[in-house]
Structures are given as C-alpha cells and as structure tokens.
Image: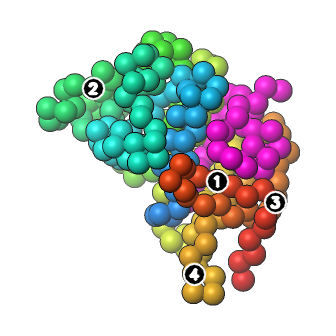
Amino acid sequence: MKRVNTGIPGMDEVLHGGIPERNVVLLSGGPGTGKSIFCQQFLYKGVVDYNEPGILVALEEHPVQIRENMKQFGWDIKKFEDEGKFAIIDAFTYGIGSSAKKEKYVVNDPNDERELIDILKIAINDIGAKRIGLDSVTTLYINKPMMARKTVFLLKRVIAGLGCTAIFTSQISVGERGFGGPGVEHAVDGIIKLDLDEINGELNRSLIVWKMRGTSHSLKRHPFDITNKGIVVYPDKVLKIK
C-alpha cells in the first residue's frame, strides 16, 4: 500500500509509515490543540518535501489571515500559489470584500455542497493536487447537521476518486466526548485526536490515533509540541493522563 508522509516529525512513526493514500482523516480536538497548524503543515510540507501540490479549503478563516498565520512558521505559500502548486479555496468570505475578489477559487454559498464540490474538483484538476485540507468540517454540520454525513461522503468520493489524501479538522468543546459531528466520524477513514490537558498545574499537548483504515498504528498517547517550525511529535514517549 502506498503511504503519504505527513511532513510532521514523529507522526509517520506513530502511523507505522504514514497515512494510506486516498484516506480521509478526521483531525479532532478542542480549541488551542493545534488542528489548523497540523493541517497546514501537512499541506505545506507536501509541496516542499514531496512535490505534492495541495489545496486548503478555508471554511472558518479568511485566506489572507491564513497566509499570514502560515508565515509565522516560515511557510510562505504565496509563491507556491503563483507556481500552481498550492491553492486556497475561499469558502469563508462568500466573495464579500476587496480581498476576497482577488481569490482565484471562491465558494459563494458554502451551504451549497454541490458548489463546494464543483470548485474543489476544478482546483484539484488545475494544480494536480495530491493533498487536501479542509478547515473545518465543523462548519458543515453546524449549518446543515442532517446533511453533514452525506456531504462528507460526497467529498470523500471526489477526493479519493481523484487520487488525493485529505485531512478534515473538527472542533469539539473542552471535555466533550466523541470527535465532533453526528455520524461524521463514521464516514472518514481515520481519526486523530489532539488534546490539551492540565497535568500537575501545566498544560500538556498529546495526540492519539483512534483509527486508521489500511494500516496498523500506535495505540498509545504521544506528546507533541508546537515549535516555531511547526508540530513535532514524540513517538518514543507516552503521556499518561490521570
């Protein structure tokens, strides 16, 4: 089975070699756990280290802000957009504002799953994308909870059918059980949960792979850090939460 390297130090060891190609992985966690950074690092490193073009579907943040946030880690994606190796699909602004009018790919109604999927198909074909990041799927099931699972299945069919591997972020509340979204966790191929827990008066970051179709993986909870160059996972360490 062909695997996709995450581009995140230590993560491929946790996954016993990387994410199986064409899998759609749900990256679930509460506020401040690093979901967006993980997703962006997966896409950026895909372009830089593996020559795999990527697409970020922005549902919760302005594309201009995303570019600025990524620069904080040294990830300047604008040049790759200009080279046709990276694309942002603006599903946040509804095309409103002068900055939004400069975006190449705009979803005018993110609640229209057909429009979202049609633009995603166009972008994938335009740049020959191999990696997709969707941040976040929470927006889909908040707006249309009854349609969320169907939409995820449609997205998964398009993404896998066109040979891409994807990460969908999912927001959950602090202390919430599950992974976010009614039934969404059953529609994806893998689930990685990011946590931020207080232990002995200090916040500790950790992740655990709950499932990953097509591969074995570590069943342990591994600590990770967010550095000025992105996320680093420690596969040889285990964090115990009391």
- Write down the residue under mark 2: 103
Q: Give the crowd class for mark 1: few <14, some 14-19, many >=20 residues within 10 Å.
A: some
- Write down the residue under mark 1: 232
Identify the image quadrant of the N terminus. Answer: top right
Q: Does the magenta stretch include residue 120?
A: no
**Secondary structure of the residue carrying numbered label 4:** strand
Residue 84 image point, x, y percent? 43, 16
Write down the quadrant of residue 94 in the picture: top left
Write down the quadrant of residue 234 in the picture: bottom right
Q: Which of marks 4 and 2 is nearer the N terminus?
A: 2
Cα–Cα gap, marks 3 and 1: 12 Å
Cα–Cα gap, marks 4 and 2: 41 Å
Mark in front: 3 vs 2: 3
Image: magenta residue range: 1-29
Q: Earlier in the sequence, mark 3 or mark 2?
A: 2
Q: Is residue 24 magenta?
A: yes
- Write down the residue under mark 4: 202
**Disc number at residue 236?**
3
The residue at the point 68 percent across, 55 percent down is 233
Identify the image quadrant of the C terminus. Answer: bottom right
Cα–Cα gap, marks 1 and 4: 19 Å
User: Against 68, is 5 above or below?
Assistant: above
Residue 194 image point, x, y percent? 61, 60
Cα–Cα gap, marks 3 and 2: 42 Å
- The amino acid type of the residue labelled 2 equals Glu
Outermost residue to the left: 98
- The amino acid type of the residue labelled 3 equals Asp
